[in-house]
Image: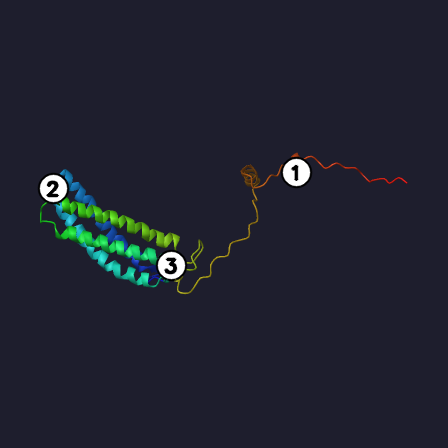
Amino acid sequence: MNRSIHLFGHPVHPLLVLFPGGLLFSAVLVDLSTLVGTGPRAVQLAQDLLALGLAGGLLAAPFGWLDWRRIPRGTRARRLGALHGGGNAVALSLFALSWFLREEGLPPSAAVLALSLVAGACMLGTVWLGGELVTRLGVGVHAGAHPDAPGSLAFHSPVPPRTPDPDPGPADPSVSLLLSVAGEEDPGAAVDAPAPPNHGPRSTRR
């Protein structure tokens, strides 16, 4: 379904979500490092990562919503897209609350840390749903995609799908042997089978 908003041949939303996802997950890891006393620099780094990640998420969200509106109604992709977007909205809200409740220069409290962990777990689920939309349901995949398709910048016109080559059969004798071992064919069956009895011409007696 080649319905996504593109930039230089690639969908915009998957390009943008890489940045907030990496920043927000990094903030969770830095938060966990403060539990072992990494110091005020780590505390400030987590706050900065959260702020940048939230800004990136707000930038990527409209493109995801526009892509979701282009998915046909009544399809599984439409339902999973709604869960993907709704889950991301919940995760961003929890991250924003975690960022808002932090105190300058102090390690995150237990409640703030819990919010970050829950938000990170929620975003892991939405990342899986995003992969399901692309790899299983074909959302954002070009209609003419195949292993020998032209480059993305050449996707200005529809590319017909590649027709598979007819199967010429294995040319290598070793391949034939492997197939016979796998049960695909049995070249020795004709040799091992007993020959049918030859009765010769039947004579007629009067």
Q: Quadrant of residue 174?
A: top right
Q: Are marks 1 and 2 in contact (CB under 8 Å)?
A: no
**Position of residue 171 in the picture relative to residue 128 (left or right):** right
Question: Looking at the rendering, which quadrant does residue 145 occupy?
Answer: bottom left
Residue 137 in the image: above or below residue 33: below
> Residue 165: percent from the left, percent from the top?
53, 53
Mark in front: 3 vs 1: 3
Task: Say what secondary structure mark 2 lies in.
Answer: loop
Q: Which mark is residue 39?
A: 2
Question: Where does label 3 land, which residue?
Answer: 75
Going by the numbered disc 2, the residue's amino acid type is Gly
Q: Earlier in the sequence, mark 3 or mark 1?
A: 3
Residue 182's label in the rendered image is none
- Dot 1 crowding, Cα within 10 Å, few <14, some 14–19, many 20+: few
**Residue type at mark 1?**
Ala
Q: Which one is in front, 128 or 179? A: 128
Q: Is 159 situated above or below 192?
A: below
Of the two numbered discs 3 and 2 on the same chain, state the one appearing first in sequence: 2
